[in-house]
Structures are given as C-alpha cells and as structure tokens.
Amino acid sequence: MAAKKPLFNRQMRRISELDANIQAGLAREEAERAKQAEAEIETVDYTPEQIAALDPALFEPAGFNEEDAERTGYSNYSYWASTFKNFWRNKVARVLIIALIAVLLFAFLQPIFPGQHDPVTINNDPETGIQLMNLAPSSEYWFGTNAIGQDLWARVWAGTRVSVFIGLVVALSDLVVGVIIGMIWGYVRKVDKVMTEIYNVISNVPQTLILILVSYILRPSITTIIISMCMVGWMAMARFIRNQVVIFRDRDFNLASRCLGTSTFRIITKNLLPQMVSVIMLQTALAIPGAIGDEVFLTYIGLGLPTSQASLGNLVEAGRVLMMQKELRYQLIFPAAVVAFITIAFYIIGNAFSDAADPKNHV
C-alpha cells in the first residue's frame, strides 16, 4: 500500500498538469480569435478618390413597410382548424361521423321521400280489409309490420327523430347548466362548500328514482321525459367542470390576470374555458346517447312516451316482448340496431373529438 500511494500521487499530478495545459491552450486560442476579430473590424481609411468612387445607392436609407413587418410575426395557427384537422386524421371517427350524419339526415328527410307509409297508420289488406299484422320484411314493408299493422320502417325513423330530438335538447341543457354551475362552483371559493353539499345530497339519490318520480307525477310526454332528464343530467358536467377549474384556477397566468385587474368573467371565458373544451365536448357527446338510453329505460318500466308516439324506446320495448318468437324477432333487431349504432357512434366520435380538442395535443 505504501508503494502504491506515491504512484497514485504522481498520476494525479500528471492529470492536473494536462488539464492546466489544455486550459492554457484554450485561452490562447480564444485570445487569437479575439485579435482576429478586432483586426477585421478596424476602420479602413479611404482616400477622397475612393470615397467618390463608391456607389451612392449603398448609402440610401432602407425602406420600412409596416405591413411587411407585421407579416413576419404573423402565425396562421387556428385552434379550431387544428382541432378539426387532428380529428379528421382519426379514420374510425371519420367514417362514423359520415355514417352518423347520413343516418340522422335520412331520418329527418325520410317522410318526404316517395312511397313512404305513415308511422301511425294501420295498414289493411286492400282485398280483405284485414290488418297486415306482423308481416315479415318485404319490398313493400322493408322492416315488416308490427302487431297492429303499422309500417315498422316508418316507425323506426320516426322514433329516431323523436329520440335524437330528446337527446339533443337534454345534451344542450346539460351543457349550458353544467358549465355555468361548474364554473361558479370551482372558481368562487365561497360557494364551493355549499355546492358540494348540494351535489352530495342530489347524487346520493339514485338518478333512476328521480326519473321515475318525475315521470310518474307528470303526464307521460316528450316534455316530461326532457324535464326528468334535465333535473339530474347537469350534475356530471358540473362536477367535471368544477374539478378542471380547481386545477387551472391558481395557475400563474390566472394569478397574473387577477393582478392586472382582469374581470372574473373574462378570466373564465378567456383563460379557463379554452382549457376545458375537450372535457365539455366529451360530456356533451356522451349526453346524447345517455338520454336515448334513459328514454328506452323509462319506456321499459312503463313510464315513457305513450305507445301511440313512435320512439326508439317504444319500439325496443315492443320488440322485447316478441323476442322469444323467432319469426317476429325482427321487430326488436331493427330498432335495437339503430339505438346501438347511435350510441356507439356518439361515444367514439366524442372521445376522438375530445382528444383532438385537448390543447396538449396541439403544436
């Protein structure tokens, strides 16, 4: 060990000397570069003849164009254009939204096409006058007829119009009420505790029970179903918005805005809402199939629309009764397929648009 220690010390001294030499070499190179730079910028003395020979155009002041200057700092970035561009890259969502638009457009235009039957008219045999009950799908009745001779094709599209209308109204109500309450709930600290208690009380009551009570008290109609769904539908949206506001409320850009005297309304609309577009879009997209599902459930328990009113809920319930009869199973398959397609399409499209609208996915 005694022999190794001097050797180690000598090696450390050699390393220190090499390092010092390297540092000295770097310093000399830096000094030489500085001298060369000074030599390059030395003023050259020109004779009067050389000065007179210079081109006068070299001494004309450069022009300034304010529009060109502004254009150099301009960015053509658009949040919504970027959002739709990102959304359109999703092939599955692209196919589904085209198919969904086609289905909904056809549902609302179907009555004006030629050769269509009325959804509430009972069709009779022109020769015998007997009701055309439970006819299998054919060229005349594409989806067949139901137990009283009504055209199932016309009733499916009429029910789609009714159910989609209910879903859109409920989704719009959830959007407006949920965003407003969620913003106040999350931003104003004084009301946070009160709103939390109100939310806990309402959320602890089963939503199904509220739907049943409202539908039972009021006369069954489209308005009754919309009211019962809107009474509890805003809670999910408000809770998500409140959680997002709490996350972004005390970020540096919001603190700076408050210090500069920015109004609360402007902070909410300019600083907070753009951060939550993805959450809002997702919840709104999911509210539409959710409302359709609730309408089907209320009809299933006997509190939905009257049987004379065509809706997807009524059609599914009528088909459910005949599900065990193989030759009549088509009366469940067709409306159930429409409900399944609309539900799945809105779910996938909502998720895809939510991802595309997320500011984190924008460059």
Image (cartoon, rainbow, N blue to C red):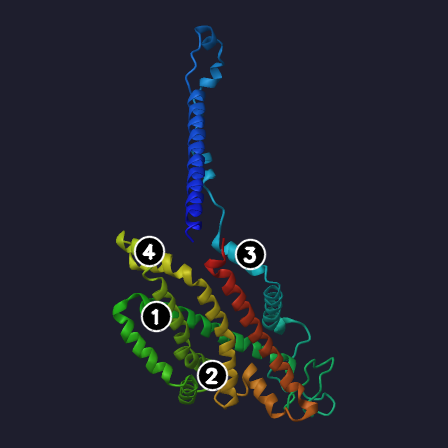
Nearest-to-viewer mark from 4 and 1: 4
Q: Amino acid at mark 2?
A: Ser
In this orientation, which residue lies closer to the viewer: 127 or 284? Answer: 284
Label located before the other in sequence (4 or 2): 2
Residue 340 vertical placement versus 355 (above, below): below
- For label 3, the residue is 85
- Residue at image point 50% right, 90% down: 301
Nearest-to-viewer mark from 1 and 2: 1
Nearest-to-viewer mark from 1 and 3: 3
What's the distance in space between the residues labelled 4 and 1, CA to CA?
24 Å
- For label 2, the residue is 221
Check disc 2: other Cα within 10 Å, few if <14, some if 14-19, many if 20+.
Answer: some
Nearest-to-viewer mark from 3 and 4: 4
The answer to which quarter of the image holds residue 263 is bottom left
In this orientation, which residue lies closer to the viewer: 312 or 272? Answer: 272
- For label 4, the residue is 252
